[in-house]
Amino acid sequence: MKKSNYAFVSALYASKTKGLYSELYFPIIKYALAKIFAAKIGGNVYCTADEVSEFIDGKFGVKIPTIVIAKSICKIGNDHNYSIVVYENGNTFRINAAFYDEDDIEQKERFFSGKLDEIEKMYEEFLTQQGCSDEGVTFVQFIADNTDDILGYFENENKSCVNEKYAVLIFFLQYVHDTDTDLYSVVHQLFWSSIVVAFLKSDKPLVNDSDNGIKTEYFLDTSIVLGLLELSTSLKQTYSKELCSIILNSGGLLKVNPMTVEEIKYILEKVEQNGPNPLTDIYDSCTRRKLLPNDLAKIRLNLGKKLLALQIDVFPNMSPNAIQSAVNNYKGKAVTKLLGDLRNKNQLSSKDNFREIHDVYMDDYIKGRRKEKKYNGNVYFLTDNIELVKFCRAQHEDASFTISAGKVVLDLWMHNKQNIDVSDCVLTETMARCLGLHKSNVRYKIMEVARFYNQTKDDFDPQVYKDFISHLYRRAKNVITTVDQINQGGAIPQSIVKLIKEAVDKDNVAYKNSLAVAIKRKQELQKETAEKEKQIEDIKIAVADLKDKVDNSNKQIGDLESENSKLSDSLQQQKEELQKKATELAQSRQEREDAKRKIELYKELNSLTLEKKEIEAELSPLEKKRGKSFKNLGPILCMIGGWASFVCGVLVMASVLFGWLESWMISILCAVWSASWFFFNRKHALENKENERANKEYAKWEAKNPRYNVLVRKLNKLEKRLEEINAEMKEGTRIRD
């Protein structure tokens, strides 16, 4: 991919979300939908998953499977910035609205593109200053190769495009990490974009997040455990801790086989006896932490407790005899010899081949452990040795379960339902792996040089040898060129030592020149600092003189302020006394006013009470007369008439039945009972309208007796005023309380 593509992807994925689809596929698909919608003039836009895939491929150079796009469309339709009608499970759809903040994305893209240029420029300056050989690599090439490696992993291929050739770039990234935190965060984001691109370019989207409920066991290789014990490089230590934290957070189990524990003890014991090899990770830790043999012995003797504190289980239980028996058994195996021959080819194998015994044993143990647990999966041997992973895969027709530590991080992220951030870890792992491969390559070069050196039998000056190893590790130009010439084969140079010394001297000159520039700049800074310090000293003297004057002035001001304070206190005291007296006077006045008001209210209350009694006395006989004005006789009369008619009807009916009267009298019976029905209905009608009739009669009476209404209105007015007086008197009592 182009630099611009990585910058654009970094812009799209600058903000983290949750889940595989939402974190990887949504941003780029949303962007494509918005661009397609904006490009087609009109209201509704009909589109297909294939069109979206083609747009993304043309814009970013990545081909997302249409099945992924269709599934994503179904979910994106619920976003508040998008209105999508889905057909055919997302393969066809209609876009009614789609908004993406393109200005923001383009601004971020320009930012990341500019930072890419800045990183490349800084890297070139770093190479010049350090005098290093970089094999012509660039940072963009670094992230592009990482994309290819991740794609190879998806295809079950053992690609390792990111290898020791990037060692100097890794040195530069470490320098950026230590000196410019903001720029390193950009490096981190750009590197993560290379992983995102790999996911997007893969035609096998790994979106399986099923959970069989069985915790995965990860048996750790020696180098990872040494990193956890802080017996490695700072980079390896950071990565090992991040890796194990991710495993634990994802629900995995950390374990170490007793054979691995034995190898760790073996390594520590050898370092205790002989000291660490300068080209080993443990040497870096011993130098940095100033560890002595007794410190290493304490770690070795308390290894079990330290592993337990790290949440690592030593499994299974093996006696010393069982361990020794396993060593003896695997020592003579053909596969062990094959691995040893492979490493001897590169001069990287131990003399007693314990390392090979351990690695082959662990590969077989993991296979047996998976069969033992009677389920397919969830047991792995975790290593950061890519060559060992390749070797183990080559030995098995079926799948090997010795896996790369870097790849298991991506697996955990893809398949874990929890939101775990792995972006920091993958960059750290890649950097540590490159330096590990570089260190192995350096050891190989040293051994090749030693092969020629042993034949010439020259003597190395200790300082020259030390500088030689240091320059070789940091890929100093002259040392690298000389070693490559020596290792090309052919005739043995007359003096290996002379060649190496000349190369070391040249690189030292370059270092000295770089150091001289730094010293000169330091001296200039010191001079500037001295001048500024003199200026500061002069300022301090002037400030001291001014301070004396200010102190005198402050003393005078203090005396005046003290006198003023006393006067202010006296004045304040007088003000408080006056305020107190004024408050007391106001309170006294208020009490008098309250008392006066209360007397007035009592007088009014008594007066109104007497008036009320007089009105009630006058009103009482009128109320009686008013009540008598309505005589409700109608219902009574109707009831009497009804019952009378009913009884007459009964008598007529009985007379007809007994033959006392003629049958024609039945017509009279009907008339009588009709009259009875009429009287009863009239009674009910009058009762229902009793209040209405009463009010009419009362109104007629009140019209003849107007004095009644006058007295009622006056009484109501008096009662309202009495309520107000009582309320006022009650409120006054409450306030005083």
Image: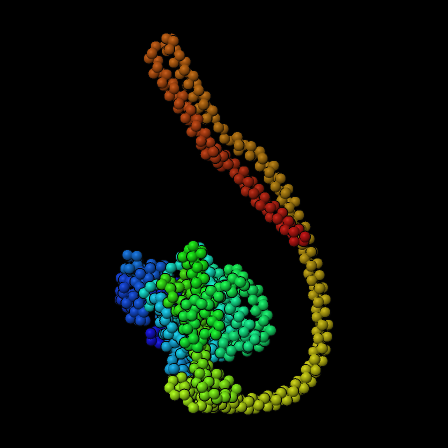
676 shown above or below 429: above
Q: Is residue 242 left or right of residue 543?
A: left
Task: Tell me what residue is drawn at x 65 percent, y 45 percent.
Answer: 606
Task: Tell me what residue is drawn at x 43 percent, y 85 percent.
Answer: 452
368 shown above or below 518: above
Task: Tell me what residue is drawn at x 38 percent, y 19 percent.
Answer: 673
Count of numbered badges drawn on the protein: 0
In this picture the colour scheme is: rainbow
Residue 427 seen: no
Q: Looking at this view, is 288 or 522 the one in front? A: 288
Q: Looking at this view, is 587 or 104 the one in front? A: 104
For the N terminus, which image quadrant?
bottom left
Image quarter of residue 536: bottom right
Residue 621 seen: yes
The percent position of residue 372, horizontal first and vertical second, equals 44, 56
The percent position of residue 404, horizontal first and vertical second, equals 42, 68
Task: Tell me what residue is drawn at x 73 percent, y 75 percent.
Answer: 566
The percent position of residue 730, horizontal first and vertical second, equals 64, 49
